[in-house]
Image (cartoon, grey):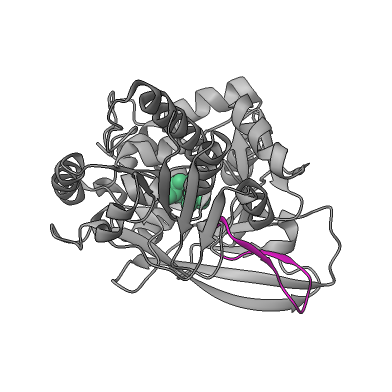
Amino acid sequence: MSRQKIAIVGAGLSGAVIGRELAEAGHEVVIFDRRDHIAGNCHTERDAETGVMVHVYGPHIFHTDDAEVWDYVNRFQAFKPYKNRVKTTSRDQVFSLPVNLHTINQFFGKTLRPDEAKAFIEEQADTSITDPQTFEEQALRFVGRDLYEAFFEGYTQKQWGCSPRDLPASILKRLPVRFNYDDDYFFHKFQGMPENGYTEMVDGILDHPDITIRLKTGFDRKDTGNYDHTFYSGALDGYFDYAKGRLGYRTLDFERFTYEGDYQGCAVMNYGETSVPYTRITEHKHFSPWEKHDGSVCYREYARECGPDDTPYYPIRLVKEKEQLAEYVALANAEEGISFVGRLGTYRYLDMDVTIREALDTARLFLDLHDKQERMPAFLNPPL
Ligand code: UDP
C-alpha cells in the first residue's frame, strides 16, 4: 500500500476522526480549518472569569446507541454521566420535556396514570391524519392541538423561521412522547459529557505524529491538486463558490450574560411561545454537574436566517434547497479525488454520534478502496 497525502478540510468531528483513522493506517494527513480552534461547532472553552466550561456554539450533549462510537469517544476523553433534562416555559408555567406524564398531568390539571393518559391523549389527537407529512400534522396526530400550540408551534416558528406546516414531520420525530415520568430528553443507551470538554477530546483524536493541523487557513478547490485525496467537511455550496446559489441554513445568535449563583436551576430552558424572542436559555455550568462554580455563564439563543458572513448551523432542506442540493450533488459527483463529509459537506442535520459513525465508515471505505485501487466516491452518505 502506498502512503497517501491526504487533505482534510475542517477540524470538527468528521475531519478529526477521518484524519486519525487514516494517520493510524500510515497515511500523511494535513487538516485545514479557517477558525482559530479545533472541534468545529462542538468547541468548548473554559470561561476565564467563572471557570465554567462553555459550549461556545451552543449545547452539545453526547448520546448514542452505537457501542463502537461510545468506546471511540471514551478512548480520547473520560465521559461523565449526564442526563439531559430539558424544561420549557409556556403560559406562565414551567413544564418538563419531552412531553411525559408529568407534562400531561400538569398541563391538563389531571392525575392520570399511564394507560389513562394514553387514552386521553389519543382523544386529543387528530386520528384523521393517517400519514403525517408535515411537522404540524405529526404534532396534531401524536399530541393534539393544545400541547402542540403550547410547546411546539411557537418554538418551531422561532427556530426555523417558517410555519410548522411547511416543515417535514421528520423534525418532530426526533422528540418522543412518554406515558411515564421519564424525563430524559434522549432515549439512547449511552449518554454523557466529556469531562474536560469536547475540544480536549478532539485534541486527543488529533494527537498523532502523522497529522499536521493548519488553523486560520482556508482551502481552495485548486489546493486539492496538491493531495492524493481530500475530505471536505466545509459547506458543499461554498466549495463550488455558490455556483448554484446558497443552500439555506439557520444560524444562531447567542446573547451571553453572567450571573452570580444559579440562574435557572437547569442546563436548558426552552421558551415555547413567540412572545419571547429567543428559543432557549442555556446555563453552561449545569452541563458539568460534577464541577462547582459560584458564577454562571448563560446564553440566550436566537435563531435566524444565515447570511453570507454568518456561521451555518441547521440545514433547512425545504423543497427549494432540495432542488439546489441535487445540482450540487451532480457537481460533486463529477469531481475527482474529493469526498464530502459531515453536516456541512452533506447538508444534513447530524447528531455527533452519527457524525462519528459516518466518519469511521468513510475512513474504512477509503482504506479498503485504496487497497483495491478503486475510486473513492464523492459521498458515502449522499445528501439526498
Ligand atoms: N421543538 C419544539 N419545542 C421544543 C423543543 C423542540 O417545537 O421545546 C421542535 C423544534 O422544531 C426543534 C425540533 O423539535 O427544531 C427538534 O428539537 P431538538 O431539541 O432535537 O433540537 P436541537 O437541540 O437539535 O436544536
Residue 364 in view (yes/no) = yes
User: In the rendered view, would you say 119 is above or below 52?
Assistant: above
Residue at 27% across, 38% down? 378
User: Measured from the top left, where is residue 367 in percent x and y?
Assistant: 44, 29
Q: Quadrant of residue 260?
A: bottom right
User: 1 or 375, which is in the foreground?
Assistant: 1
Residue at 34% across, 32% down? 380
User: 194 or 95, which is in the foreground?
Assistant: 194
Residue 265 in view (yes/no) = no
User: 358 or 140, which is in the foreground?
Assistant: 358
The verdict on residue 47 being magenta is: yes
In which quadrant of the rendered image does the N terminus lie? top left
> Which stretch did the figure color magenta?
42-56
On the rendered structure, is 116 left or right of 80? Answer: left
User: 83 or 118, which is in the foreground?
Assistant: 83
On the rendered structure, is 32 left or right of 193? Answer: left
Q: Quadrant of residue 170?
A: top left
